[in-house]
Image (spheres, grey):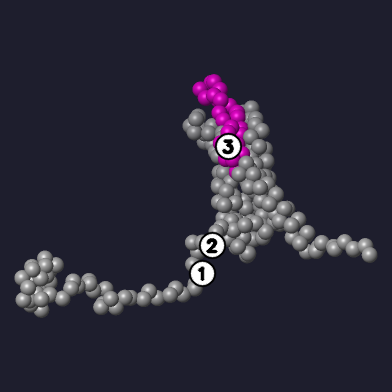
Amino acid sequence: MTALPVPQPRAATSADATRRRAGRSLGIALLLGAVGAAVVLIASGQIWAEGSATVAGGAVSLDASGRDVTGVPAALAVVGLAALVAVFAVRTAGRLLVSALLALSGAGATVAALVGAGDGAALDDEAARTTGDTAATVAALTHTAWPYATAAGGVLILLAGLLALRYGSHWPTMSGRYERDGTPRAARVREPAAGRAKATGPATDPDRPEDIWKALDRGEDPTG
């Protein structure tokens, strides 16, 4: 008779595939989140807008960085980094909330960068300070590509958050070695005083002078 092949359990195969996907998603999410936050922090510190203002018959060049335009992307990038680390410190519902915060940080940074890409208010304020005229405005206003680079970094953070929402429940958590599990600890048994007492030397014969001197050397009372 020909032996029939034994089918492998489907459950085990499915579990292995899930673990592999979770491992890949974990590495990708960490990379996306870290790179995205770095891009946002760097790009938001670059020049976003340039122009000129008229001062005493001449023109002076002005520029505004992304953080002059809006500080929201940089702040949300820091929040995203904190959420990316906190994902591994929480479980179940807490992990879901932190993953959502990570995704929202990326989405918020993206929207704020795109809104600030065409903003000229920061340069108008700079022109007013430079000329001393509160009604001064900027001429020849141009914008750089840095706001869009900032938005791209926000998208990377958003993708990291979406991966955490999808696969975060399968990611590992921090070791529970140092966590208290609420189990009552056994009370420490104290040794009776008699057991802790210092062992005394051999019995002292008061009729033998050498025994008396030995007892005195040991700090004992030979008359006791």
Identify which amino acid the numbered label 1 is placed on: Asp
* Element carrying mark 2: loop
Which residue, given by chain and number where applicable, does mark 2 sit on? Answer: 176
User: Rounded to the nearest whole Å, what is the CA distance between mark 3 and mark 2?
Assistant: 36 Å
The answer to whether mark 2 and mark 1 are in CB contact below 8 A is yes
User: Rounded to the nearest whole Å, what is the CA distance between mark 1 and mark 3?
Assistant: 42 Å
Which residue, given by chain and number where applicable, does mark 1 sit on? Answer: 181
Q: Residue at x 51, y 69 (%)?
A: 181
* Element carrying mark 3: helix
| Mark 1 surroundings: few (<14), some (14-19) or many (≥20) residues within 10 A | few
| Mark 3 surroundings: few (<14), some (14-19) or many (≥20) residues within 10 A | some
Magenta span? 37-63
Tell me: residue 41, above or below residue 55. Answer: below
Instruction: Give residue 150's position: percent from left, percent from top.
Output: 63, 39
Residue 161 in the figure: left or right of residue 13: left
Q: Residue at x 43, y 75 (%)?
A: 186
Instruction: Give residue 163's position: percent from left, percent from top.
Output: 69, 52
Which residue, given by chain and number where applicable, does mark 3 sit on? Answer: 42
In the rendered structure, which disc, 1 or 3, sits on the residue that comes first in sequence? 3
